[in-house]
Amino acid sequence: MTSPDSVLIVGASAAGLSTAEALRRHGYQGRLTLLDAGPHLPYDRPPLSKQVLAGAWEPARVQLRDPARLEALQAEFALDEPAVALDAAARAVTTGSGRVLRADALVIATGLTPCRLPGQDGLAGVHVLRTLDDALALRRDLTAGRRLVVVGEGVLGAEVAATARALGLDVTLAGMGRTPLGEQLGDVIGELLSRTHGERGVRLRLGVTVEELTGAGGQVTGVRLAGGELLAADVVVVAVGSRPATGWLEGSDLPGLPGLPGLTPGGGVACDSRCRAAEGIYAVGDVASWQHEGLGRRLRLENRTNATEQAQAVAANILGADRPYTPIPYFWTDQYDVKIQAHGLPSPAAELTVVDGDPEERRFTALYREGGRVTGVIGWNMPKQARVLRQQALGAQSLASA
Amino acid sequence: MKIIIDEDKCCGAGQCVLIAPEVFDQRDDDGIAVLLQAEPDAGQHDAVREAAAVCPGAAIELSD
């Protein structure tokens, strides 16, 4: 494929921006347009549940690039312009305002939409956390409120609970999993996180289903659990997972490539190992479900590192490279003074073996093993040692630069 | 080329060390990135640009 004359990137967050920057870095001089449903120039999401929610950072600090850098990118940013339809054959995207944008190459980088609970809409005090505006609205309510219930014991829910507790709120963390992050990292790590949250005064209601949100006069009053317990709340955060933001593609004619369905059953954009969803159409970041050649399976990663790493592969492939995207997945989470680093594919099914340090001292690294093979590395307050262990145990390849 | 690391944004991933080990390292105690060369040799520039591009904390600032 020759280099395109125009590239349209749908989604101007970390993955979309990184794709644009990588295109320019590799010499692309054609037209570059970034479309986004939100009103803001590219900003970073991981600090939203931590520094921004805590009030430690001014909102402006999450801007990913200063105005001079964005200027140098020589790209058009079309903000507040949600994509509503795709004409795949023409590589044309229709926006909410009726604009039709056409390009030689199209990149789908629309990210995720948080799942919601029944009855949530129209009830004041109930929040999801995905955007900067979500974070600022939640912060306003946390500043005014006293009792917070977080529904969802994954990374986001656990981080919000930790941040709110540090702000002095009365916090309950409720969720279907037995331990915080247990479904991602297994119960050994999950138990340690349970203890950590418990020691800080977070009430845990785990392994239970939420029955309903309760309200009075349009304001949330609590969360009722299966079994009847009512958790009184001034503020509720719903952090029960997300879905790929691909609703705008459902009525479209994304044809896929031979053997690819367009969208996966989970709503991700089905891509080949080159992150290509159709001729001239690519996907990057949280929305992209692609074939990882190293693992021999389809993967879709909802983490920050994937956004920037996958962008490097997508940009190279747009410009004519033929590069499979084969990363070692990585995510981190910060809760209180705990910094967890997870490399590879940790799983509750794996066996965990401590390599260095001591879980009782809350500073250690460990390996995940499944079927005799090392599948993941975790560090608890040992980031550097975890990275070194990753290089030893999972291979030294820096997959973004392969 | 000059490199500045925003320690407050660094998440300790170590992606920079994986990509440009002659330029970046991490502190033993908290994993925050440190510079082995604040003004790297020309031969390192491509790797440094890539490290800045993929840094999940957006913590690496470059000036030419």
Image (cartoon, coloured by chain):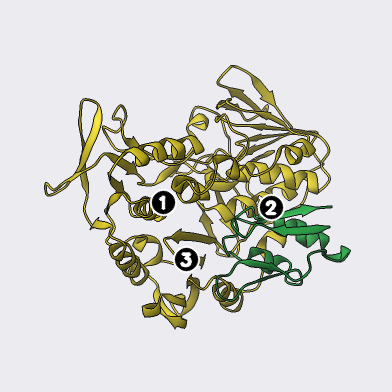
Chain colours: A yellow, B green
Q: Mark 1 points at which residue?
A: A156
- Looking at the rendered structure, the kind of residue marked 3 is Ile
Mark earlier in primary sequence (2, 1): 1
Which amino acid is tagged 1? Leu
Q: Where is residue A398 in the image (x, y as percent from the top left)?
A: 67, 66
* Residue A372, image quadrant: bottom left
Report how far apart the C-alphas of labels 3 and 1 lie in the structure. Answer: 13 Å
Residue depth check, mark 2 versus mark 3: number of the one nearer the observer? 3
Residue matched to label 3: A340
Could you tell whether A267 is left or right of A399 in the image? Answer: left
Residue at 40% in and 36% down? A140
Q: Which of marks 2 and 1 is in front?
A: 1
User: Looking at the image, is mark 3 or mark 1 earlier in the sequence?
Assistant: 1
* Residue with the most extreme left position: A228
Question: Which numbered dot is residue A313?
Answer: 2
Residue under mark 1: which chain is it in?
Answer: A
Query: Which residue is drawn at the image coordinates 69% and 45% (left, top)?
Result: A19
Relative depth, front residue between A240 and A310: A240
Task: Tell me the distance, in whole angstroms, between the alpha carbons under discs 2 and 3.
Answer: 27 Å
Q: Can residue A23 be seen in this view?
A: yes
Between marks 2 and 1, how big is the CA–CA gap?
27 Å
Residue A137, above or below A192:
above
Give neighbour class at mark 3: few <14, some 14-19, many 20+ (Cα, 10 Å).
many
Whether residue A345 is visible, yes or no, is no
Q: State the image coordinates of residue A159 (x, y, percent, origin top left).
A: 41, 54
Q: Which amino acid does label 2 sit on?
A: Ala
